[in-house]
Amino acid sequence: MYNYIRKKYTNVLKIVKSVHLVMSVRLIFGLYYEISSRKLLNTLVKIYCIFIGLALVTQEIWITADNAFDRKARSAYQIAVYIANFLIALFFNSENFFPVLEKIRKVDRLLKDLKVKDEILISRSIMFVSIATRLYTHLTFCLLYPIHCYGNIFIFDLCMYTTHFARIMVFESLWHRTRLICKYFERELNVIRTEDSEEIIVEKIRNCMRIYKELVNVVEQDMVAMKPMMTESAILEGIVEFLVTIAPAIFGELINNRVKKIKLHVEKQLLYCKGESTRDAIEDAMMFFKHHPFKYIVWRLLTVDGTLILSVIGLLATYTVAVVQFTHVF
């Protein structure tokens, strides 16, 4: 009996920890992703998503038709964001989420015994906290103003939160891999200090760089579908939504911190190199870091890291100053 309960608990825990749980929540709200290799099943899922999407948008328009202008404006923004995410999910398979995730997971095979225990722990926690917070605020509002309480508004608000999570999960997964790569670099490069053979040292350094290159290639080549939606987020209400919006930037900054440590581990080898071949290999590695920085840039303008918020503020300030100057001229 104990073993049966334990087995059931383990299975439930695996489901909760799976990325499919989060993607299934998105699917409930009409955000499509390929759930199977069978075309018929995927077609039926697309029909379901189209039906749900149209129903949600229609209900939102109908409910807010007689509201004040500020509520209509907010609703129009939400509908526009939802439709954009809906179309991206429908035509780009949820921003190519699973293909990108599989490319990221390929790095695990190169890291040997280093494994990620839970690659979406923070993303999943944010999602549960977001849903719980929205449920609490809507229930409180309904108790205070039962006449204006609409379940459809609550459902559409949840839709707005779930649109972000494919991107958040990808960036968290990247962050976990950079942590492991950092540990791998540290371990491997500490070992080669005792090596006398320059060929072994050079091979280990190049092997480390190949692993890093695998992760960089994912950002440069496979995450293109995520770029159109990366900056459509906006701060609408409260700390939870703010956290959801900047979560990719937080993970981007954490990734960059790990990359800096990786570069530091490589630079330290200059203190222990025993020949020109080793020095050349280290210099080649540093040149690769220089020409292939871990930067995820949207519209060649905004970098998704800790400077994202400051970049947006700076951009708005620049355009505001420019507009003010033009008004004085004309």
Image (cartoon, helix red, strand yellow):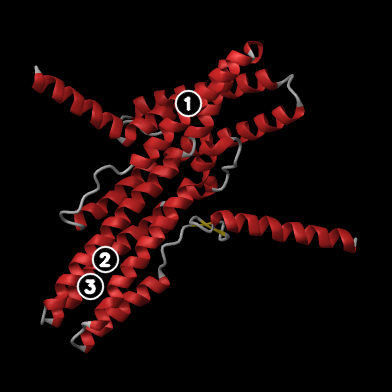
**Residue at the disc numbered 1:** 29
**Residue at the disc numbered 2:** 210
Q: Earlier in the sequence, mark 3 or mark 2?
A: 3
- Quadrant location of the N terminus in the rendered image: top left
In this figure, what is the number of numbered marks?
3
Q: Which residue is outermost to the top?
A: 147
Q: Which residue is outermost to the bottom?
A: 276
- Quadrant location of the C terminus in the rendered image: bottom right
- The x, y position of residue 20, in whole percent, is 33, 33
- The x, y position of residue 210, in whole percent, is 26, 66
**Residue at the disc numbered 3:** 205
- The x, y position of residue 213, in whole percent, is 32, 64
Q: Identify the amino acid type marked 3.
A: Ile
Residue under the point 41% across and 31% down: 128
Quadrant for residue 132, please give it.
Answer: top left
Q: Is residue 318 placed above or below 103 in the rendered structure? A: below
Q: CA distance from mark 3 to mark 2?
A: 9 Å
10 Å crowding of disc 1: few (<14), some (14-19), many (20+): many
Q: Earlier in the sequence, mark 1 or mark 2?
A: 1
Q: CA distance from mark 1 to mark 2?
A: 40 Å
Q: Earlier in the sequence, mark 3 or mark 1?
A: 1
Quadrant for residue 81, please give it.
Answer: top right
Q: Nearer the viewer, residue 80 or 1?
A: 1
Q: Is residue 55 placed above or below 95 in the rendered structure? A: above
- The x, y position of residue 69, in whole percent, is 76, 28
Give the foreground label among 3 and 2.
Answer: 3
Is residue 316 visible in the rendered structure shown here? yes
